Image (cartoon, grey):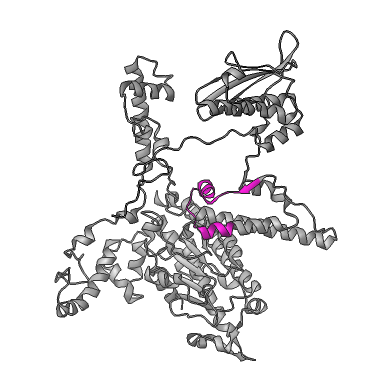
Amino acid sequence: MSLPVANMAAARVCSTVPVLLKCGNYSFSVNVATAKLSKQVICRHISRNSALCRKNLAAAGPEKFTAEFIQKQIEEFNIGKRHLANIMGEDPENFTQEDIDRSITYLFPSGLFEKKARPLMKHPDEIFPKQRAVQWGEDRRPFHFLFYTGKQSFYSLMHEIYGKMLNIEKHQDRLRSKGLFSKDGQKISLGMSRWFTKEELEASLVENISTHDYERFIQVMERLLSMPYCGAEQEFVLRFRQLLQAQSRNQVVPPLQKDEDGVAFSAADGCRKSSISSVVLRDCGSGRVSINGQDSLLYFPVLQDREQLMFPLQFTGTLGRFDLRGTVSGGGRASQAGALRLAISRALLSFLTPSDGEMMRQAGLLTADPRVRERKKPGQEGARRKFTWKKR
Amino acid sequence: MAVRAFSKGLLGLRHSRGVLTKYSSAGQTVSAAASVSSPQPQPDDVAEKILNVPLEKPDFFRVAELFSLKDLFDARVHLGHKKGCRHRLMEPYLYGCRLDQDIFDLDQTVEHLQLALNFTAHIAYRGGIILFVSRRRQFGHLVESTAKDCGEYAHTRYWQGGLLTNANIQYGPGVRLPDLIIFLSTLNNVFQQHVGIRDAAKMNIPTVGVVDSNCNPSLVTYPVPGNDDTPVTMELYCRLFKMTINRAKDKRKQMELLYGLNAPSSSS
């Protein structure tokens, strides 16, 4: 590559050197060797500016590691693992990652708060970011037919989608010619799902996409879904959809157990701020309440706290039916009451019908209160309160 | 015509210096490179033979048999744009103008297309990388499928600035650039000349291009004056290029087998 450049550049320079001399100050000067062009290899000294020698670090992108380097790192890791096992006096053959972590924390105790800053020994695949392998073979022909576009995976995906759309249209035409075409056809059932976000798509393609590309992708997929006979491509479409987390968490109903007397009871836990409580509801029809061994009147002298305890039972109309035995610790007066309330509501679920349970959920009895004390920030008096502003 | 094809064809290729020395008398631009390496005549060398045999006949791959003037007419290749869209440099290729619509001279088109297909066949025979470029959204899928079927490459998407000129940073160090770029439509979506034509000229990559009556044929190495708007025409072009490339590659395999079998018996 250097040879033709020297030839071409030398030819150009001979004509422009007089121009340069006339124009005066330049940051670099070109010295042309007086050897003839045609016969020999020309060796020219070009004195360069320091600006030209500086590497453009931003343009280089993230640091790239060759496959041999990663391979060497893996070998070193495996040898190091065996040495570590010998140091700890354990079997080198069955030395797992947890053993490695344990040994490292033992040999190199660190008081640093940031877990990622502590000494670490992991397999190189987890440390070095995933990179694309070299995209061409021995004859330097690229493997993928869309390599020269720059974004081969994304564009090949678009090509595939368009191909599928053409197939569906052909299928529709065939049905129309036979007279079997109907507007409803085979549609895809999506269920509770959403399209992949841009980040998820980038992760699945191992390639960077622009927002414009992502929007085009969504448009094309929507168009594919709008066609009547798209049912054939169901699994292809579902590959790019993410199932939404349905309200599956609240279905956890504590199991109904029976003790020796044949009385049905259920147990549940609750928490609020820094209080945790555990409650046992017994279906004996007495309506007695005891917390931490004490009666509720003694433990909660304030009416508001006792009302909090009663509210779930009053809401479901089961005030005198259950016998309550609870333990609570941590927090203050009101937070303990709130924790107990949540525990009682959860324990009640096992005695009630699902519709009553749904009513309790809508009343907010089954939701754990997420509010905690907000920290004080520096430069302010409290979490929100600022220092008094003085004009002068 | 054949000699011009050969000298132009050899310009873009980076390997086989021995061939360059043989044809040093043909073109003045080739002599500078020829004098650098000393001639090494080895007629018994199998590789030399495989590369030189197709250069002896003018139409070694018989691309002229792939199409006729009637096929071009049936595929509506002769239809150009309206008189107002006409590019000044396309006037030599036009037969005339009927009801304000330009008509291409199909005799010239046949000659140009034969040259272009012959050149493509030689490039494919020598294992060169061929890149199909077209920015028409209507035919993007067709072009990409054609490229896939030939085993070559396609680019029918937005052309980022430094794809050819800044290749080492775009793709990675040590990338190999295409040896031939085939433009199935030389204009981009805003009716300006495709950036790839200028970039290929900068990087010394020969181009084959279907130039319509509103295009500029100057920088294209092997222009093919003809229609680029009708689906029938595009399908014809894609079919022709696919057939030439497949033919050339099959011929190469045939020659390797032939001379590979002959070589052990002759060299011993």
Q: Main secondary structure of the magenta part?
A: helix
Identify which residue is drawn at 84% across, 60% down: A178
Q: Nearer the viewer, residue A343 or A298?
A: A298
Q: Is residue B56 left or right of residue A320?
A: left
* Residue B37 seen in this snapshot: no
Q: Is residue A206 magenta?
A: yes
Q: Nearer the viewer, residue A155 or B142?
A: A155
Identify which residue is drawn at 50% across, 26% down: A332
Q: Residue furthest top?
A: A260
Res B168 quadrant in image: bottom left
Q: Residue furthest right?
A: A179
Identify which residue is drawn at 82% across, 58% down: A182
- Which quarter of the rendered picture does the N terminus of chain A lie within? bottom left
Measured as percent of width and height from the top left, residue A367 is found at: 62, 34
* Residue A331 seen in this snapshot: yes
| Magenta span of residues | A193-217
Measured as percent of width and height from the top left, residue B224 is found at: 53, 77
Measured as percent of width and height from the top left, residue B244 is found at: 56, 65
- Which quarter of the rendered picture does the C terminus of chain A lie within? bottom left
Q: Nearer the viewer, residue B148 or B63?
A: B148
- Above or below residue A388? Residue A105 is above
Res A179 quadrant in image: bottom right
Q: Nearer the viewer, residue B209 or B256?
A: B209
